[in-house]
Amino acid sequence: MFCYQCQETAGCTGCTRAGVCGKSARTAALQDLLVYVTRGLCQLTTALRNQGEAIIPEDDRLVTENLFVTITNANFDKEMIVARIRATLERNAALRSRLDGAGLSAAARWDGSGDWDDKAQAVGILSTADEDIRSLRELITYGLKGMAAYNHHVNAYGKSAPGVDAFLQAALAKTLDDSLTAEELTALALETGKYGVDVMAALDEANTSAYGHPEVTRVNLGVRDNPAILVSGHDLHDLEQLLEQTVGTGVDVYTHGEMLPAHYYPAFQKYPNFAGNYGNAWWQQKEEFEAFRGPILLTTNCLVPPKDSYKNRLYTTGAVGFPGCPHIGADRQGHKDFSALIAHARRCPSPIELEQGTLVGGFAHNQVLALADQVVEAVKSGAIRKFVVMAGCDGRAKSRDYYTEFAKALPQDTVILTAGCAKYKYNKLELGNINGIPRVLDAGQCNDSYSLAVIALKLKEVFGLEDINELPIIYNISWYEQKAVCILLTLLHLGIKNIKLGPTLPAFLSPNVLNYLVEHFAIAPVTTPEADLKEILG
């Protein structure tokens, strides 16, 4: 195996024996094979679109789900991955029959014959010999994986983001094209950022039309004396279905990790059994899932391979899978039956309390723009000198303590804008407020990073600026997996420069590709909180 798609890849060079994430070499190889046949599927759908033929929604969904399954910490179940490879091969054969076969790649023509282990090794990341071409292809692919994750959430509402499926498939097909130059692939990477904006806008519309705009909300961190279910991941539609089915059962529902921002949506606040948030970021789940004592529903990434002590009460759904964990599927209408999960909860004791108190969040774009006059006045008066965007991911690495120390060291006239699980590095610090504006404004999940772009563009308009980089906003982004790559490409598409990125730079960026990003966008790695603050604030 060879994998370097996440920030924690071994030695910041690549995992070669097993994934730091917990994937076996065999599972990683099968995921490489799934990406390969999905590239072939995308070439076929793109060719048919170019002939003016329609692509059925099931094929669009197959591409989206295939890519989502291969995101770091989503699926560890070899059987599920094999089933998806077989389903994709079947669709590829059906679509090939509608084309004359001219110009089709080996990925589009492969019928599944031969040894799959040998095939996976032959088509993996290192099969692209040129380092720069390989780097750009992987940068695009990881951005598309992130886009697919967002697209999945849009699809959960029975909606689609205009143009996104067609672009995603065309772009993934282009990663098979040996005629494309580094310059052309660079342009494609930046175009991926453009469609990243589009898919996140579609997801924002889907979420807010279903559940209302997030509002400033105080979320309870303690526990009640009732049996309970813990929901982790990102899928709000799954959470809605679970809450509907638990009403009146005596079972409480708590959020974990990236599901915390669900509390900010008005529609969820009507459920009396929606008890609060339990625990912290995804990487702490082994200890926290143990202490919860009731069943856990993992709706999307990020899953840490579970301990045997709670494995039997960890349920997966959607793109998530782990061998031995019960999986809850959906019917053709997207409905999921959580009755087994609820029955399991009623047999379990209430959670062990980890902490007490509350957290405040809900500062998505609609809420922040409602405070626009207050914010503008604070900036004009000098009460707010800088906004610091500290969005992104959290993770296990000790080096991520940098973000806690950076937040602590920020001067009192700065405000943090955050989204994603990166917030767990500082959202429980007592950082105070500026004229009633909290110094940590939590916009929500990584799925809600669109809010940060909307806020920035609105401030640019309000202050009458020509260049978004003239705003009093600095960017210090932490990354872990592929949704963060999509967000980074989105920021680059918007023309944002001088981004600090950490805790390490991506291993998949070759020196030449990195130099391009430095020269054109002034991307730089984080160093120390003290040095970075001095550079950023002067």
Image: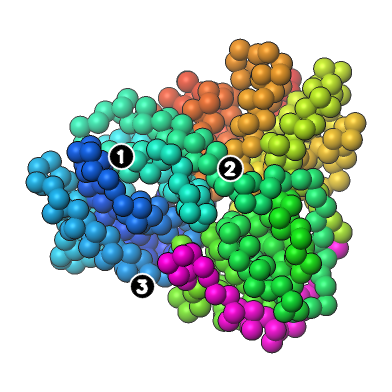
Look at the picture and state if 311 lies above or below 405. Answer: below
- Quadrant containing the C terminus is top right
Mark 2 is on which residue type?
Answer: Glu
Label 2 vs 1, first from the N-terminus? 1
> To which quarter of the image does residue 50 belong?
top left
Label at residue 487 = none
Label at residue 205 = 2
- In the image, 267 versus 190, the foreground residue is 267
Q: Residue 170 colored magenta?
A: no
Label at residue 79 = 3
Q: Residue at x 63, y 83 (%)?
A: 344
Q: CA distance from mark 2 to mark 1?
A: 25 Å
Instruction: Pinpoint residue 82: horizontal percent, then vertical percent.
Output: 31, 68
Density class for disc 1 (Cα within 10 Å; few <14, some 14-19, many ≥20) is: some
- Circle 1 residue: 170
Q: CA distance from mark 3 to mark 2?
A: 35 Å
Label 3 vs 1, first from the N-terminus? 3
- Circles 2 and 1, Cβ within 8 Å, touching? The answer is no
Residue interval drawn in magenta? 329-356
- Left or right? Give the position of 173 relative to 527: left
Mark 1 is on which residue type?
Answer: Ala
Q: Residue at x 75, y 64 (%)?
A: 271
So how many labels did they put on this image? Answer: 3
Q: Residue at x 27, y 45 (%)?
A: 54
> To which quarter of the image does residue 195 belong?
top left
